[in-house]
Image (spheres, rainbow, N blue to C red):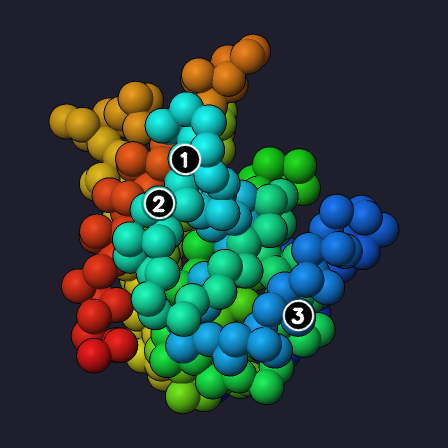
Amino acid sequence: MPLALLALIAAAPPPSATPTSRLDEPAWAARHAAKLEEVRRKHPDLIFLGDSITQNWEKHGGPAWDDFAPGWQRFYGRRNAVNLGFSGDTTANLLWRIENGEVDGISPRAAVVLIGVNDFGGPHWSVADTLAGILAVVAALHARLPSTHILLLGVLPNAWSDHIAAQTAALDAALRRRDWAPMNATCLDLSHIFLRNGVLDRSLFFDPLLDPPQPPLHPTAQAQERLSEAIEPALLKILK
């Protein structure tokens, strides 16, 4: 690992890069316990780590825009995959999960990571701090899973607010500039999937369909399948 990166991680970390649990939330604690058991039982070849966008792949039934499970089954059902997405997680929460058992005793061939947008929400962390959090997540994964290739996805474009949309674009630009090879990682920026003529395609998000409507943040099930299709070439190279 480059000395500059080691120095960055070793320095007093910002809150975004400080492992932080949510064990005081019963649903989160129960999901963590269940995922520890699932990982132990399955010894997955492929893991997905992230927040609600990743966890949504477990949703089944209801309107078509909210029925994600068929897409997961289509792309990952035969790949011995485990979904480690936790709604509401920040980089700090994901870092705590990595350091507290969710990747222990396994050696998956690939780990897909999508995290960071919640750092801009409740905590209101900066782009620099969120980048530090993502670096800490990838470094922690690489330390525990040195033979696993990490596929880091850029934070998806959104309209949570004008400020967060701008932060997201700045973060993705910073992620693209990084050399991820020393941590056996590849970064994919898939923003183009969610843009039409350079403008966010709001039809690809289900939040405006909620009652009451919310700003676009979470892809629909159909848009998430587009995401899987875009990931597939890189994933095939790793898993072949």
- Residue 226 screen position, x and y as percent: 24, 43
Q: Quadrant of residue 87?
A: top right
Give above or below for 52 relative to 113: above
Q: Residue at x 40, y 41 (%)?
A: 68
- 38 or 18, nearer to the observer: 38
Q: What kind of element bears circle 2?
A: helix
Identify residue type, mark 2: Pro
Residue 18 relative to residue 235: left or right: right
Q: Single out the mark in the foreground, 2 or 3.
A: 2
Identify residue type, mark 1: Asp
Q: Residue at x 67, y 75 (%)?
A: 101
Residue holding disc 1: 67
Identify residue type, mark 3: Leu
Q: Which residue in the rendered view is the most extreme toward the left?
A: 197
Residue holding disc 3: 36
How far, Cα to Cα, is label 2 from label 3?
24 Å
Residue holding disc 2: 70
Residue 168 visible to the viewer = no
